[in-house]
Amino acid sequence: MGVSDLADYPWDAVAPYAERARQHRGGIVDLSIGSPVDETPAIIAAELANATDAHAYPQAAGTPALRSAIAEWYDRRRGVPGLNDTHVLPTVGSKELVALLPLLLDLRPGDVVVHPRAAYPTYEVGARVVGATPVAADDPADWPQGTKLVWLNSPGNPDGRVLGVEELRAAAARARELGAVLASDECYAELGWEGEWADAAIPSVLDPRVTAGDLTGLLSVYSLSKQSNLAGYRAAFLAGDPALVARLLAARRHLGLLPPAPVQRAMTVALLDDAHVVEQKARYARRRSILKPALEAAGFRIDRSEAGLYLWATEGRDAWESLGRLADLGVLAGPGAFYGPFFPQHVRLSLTATDERIAAAAERLAAV
């Protein structure tokens, strides 16, 4: 199978519901896709503008300043000390890495790529592009022989599930048993809301409590799209096993996967400033505090969602029916079917709408 064999882009199926929602007299409240709506912080935008003289090719490995900022950020924000230039690598957004990692690791037909049961669809896409077999399984005991790559996602998209230290440790042990690379997509890690994650830092797969100092076979993937409103910059990075990082760097050089030089400068500034991240989290917390009780009052149950950028909701009926009910209120959600076959009655609602639009959604739900 190749790229031309992939199914149609799934979001096209939501278009009729979007049109239905647009007919609402108050306009659409689009909570379907988690694309940031808030401004890029001024200090980051200013650095991008200052870096427009980018006449030379950028470094695939990242500038020394960016690599240092990534390593320092893992220490300061994720509790992962001791990383250096050999452990980190910038990427052109995180989606391209997720989609291309099976290719970059030289996976082939017959190999297995494991991903969560409630999963961002690009994990499966990356497996299918190289002819590997995608398997949805959350329990490490269910990961089959022949597994070459395991994707974790914590906090999860769409369900907001957080994996604690013990779960990450068990996953790492099982992956090593199988001889598989364990890649953890952690791009919502700054957005903890409930339970212990309301106050405690969400652990990385590189956390010393998980690794006991051994990073072999482990990768952490992160994006600045959400915490810094840099989705349009395509600003992301990975960290972990230096042997894997070197292997990926070599492949990315050959393929020309080079983060633009101005973006590398902007990323460096973003990673060194925590104030804008705190401010953005407060915006999402405010919106969540309005949207969640409104959904519950309208008959939805919110499952998991203890962290991340989404509310994973069900009213106990087919998701497409719920999508239609919401569309009649002018609210657009995403159907659970897009995230695997296990959640046909769930919908995903994003917190990435303005305060005014979130308030409008809550008002409409209250009128039901």
Image: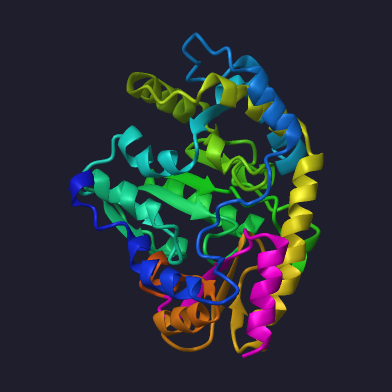
Instruction: Tell me the quarter of the picture where residue 164 sits.
Output: bottom right
Q: For the view shown, which residue lies furthest in the front direction?
A: 25
Magenta segment includes 253: no
The residue depicted at 74 percent of the width and 50 percent of the height is 280
Describe residue 264's horizontal placement relative to residue 149 as left or right. right
Instruction: Tell me the quarter of the picture where residue 144 sits.
Output: bottom left
Query: Between residues 179 and 229, which one lies in front from this camera angle?
Result: 229
Q: Which residues are magenta?
A: 343-368
Camera sees residue 69: no
Instruction: Classify 145 as above or below 264.
Output: below
Q: Quadrant of the C terminus?
A: bottom right
Magenta segment includes 360: yes
* Color encoding of the figure: rainbow
Camera sees residue 341: yes
Instruction: Classify 184 as above or below 83.
Output: below
The residue depicted at 42 percent of the width and 28 percent of the height is 248
Instruction: Classify 155 as above or below 208.
Output: below
